[in-house]
Image: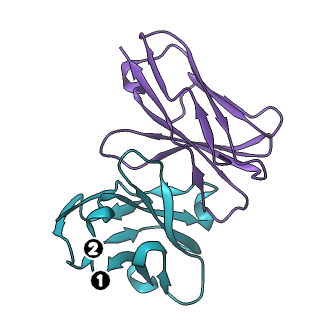
Amino acid sequence: AQSVSQHNHHVILSEAASLELGCNYSYGGTVNLFWYVQYPGQHLQLLLKYFSGDPLVKGIKGFEAEFIKSKFSFNLRKPSVQWSDTAEYFCAVNAERSGYALNFGKGTSLLVTP
Amino acid sequence: DTGVSQNPRHKITKRGQNVTFRCDPISEHNRLYWYRQTLGQGPEFLTYFQNEAQLEKSRLLSDRFSAERPKGSFSTLEIQRTEQGDSAMYLCASSPHGTGELFFGEGSRLTVL
């Protein structure tokens, strides 16, 4: 079945640690890739997106993600996390062959401790 | 605030009752989506509108669920004969284009007793 998989469901890091959250998808063909973030008590908002071109994309707040087509992956990274990065992170895929839907992974809950 | 607006924010109802949620998208966005999210899960796609046309419905959307967008502006999601399994956050999102970049509202939380 077509899906979006996020490998880590819960991550706890200390401030200044580096972050990498994994995301793999199983859709073939052309895909648009996204990371959304949901801070406590807030609505989902876009962190970064990849449509085409440079596979390394930069988003807000120092986040970046790398699209590796051969691995069907779109991992999220940040060199040094802050307490304010505590949030739920969702990888999402819009695939040409899967209609109009944006399909989400189950999310990764990140807790950054001071 | 010119973001996506959803009402009511919270709804508690008894099993078997009908509920309706409203979504007002960003005004210039012609694409509108409904999603459902339960604890520990990512948003699950329910349905999609382009202007007033409902172009896609998920298999998750049972016959008890109906969505409309009568004039291509606001949308409503009605759940008839609610069941406890319908308890979830119902999210609305809009988009100005078809790339999948969505702008979400804060959601309507449904609790079915």
Q: Residue at x 75, y 52 (%)?
A: B29
Q: Which residue is mark 2?
A: A81
Cα distance between the residues tagged 2 and 1: 7 Å
Where disc 1 sits, the SS reads: loop
Tell me if I can see residue A29 in this picture. yes
Q: Which mark is residue A79?
A: 1
Tell me if I can see residue A72 in this picture. no
Q: Chain of mark 1?
A: A
Q: Is residue A11 left or right of residue A50?
A: left
Q: Which mark is residue A97?
A: none
Which of the 4 image quadrants contains residue B111? top left
Whether B75 is drawn above or below A11: the answer is above
Q: Chain of mark 2?
A: A
> Which chain is represented by purple in the image?
B
- Answer few, some or many: residues within 10 Å of disc 1's Cα (few below 14, many 20 plus, some between 14 and 19): few
Colour of the chain lettered A:
cyan
Badge 1 amino acid: Pro
Of residues A40 and B37, the one nearer the viewer is A40
From the top left corner, tell me how far across and down residue B96 is, in percent: 73, 58
Of residues A11 and B86, the one nearer the viewer is A11
Where disc 2 sits, the SS reads: loop
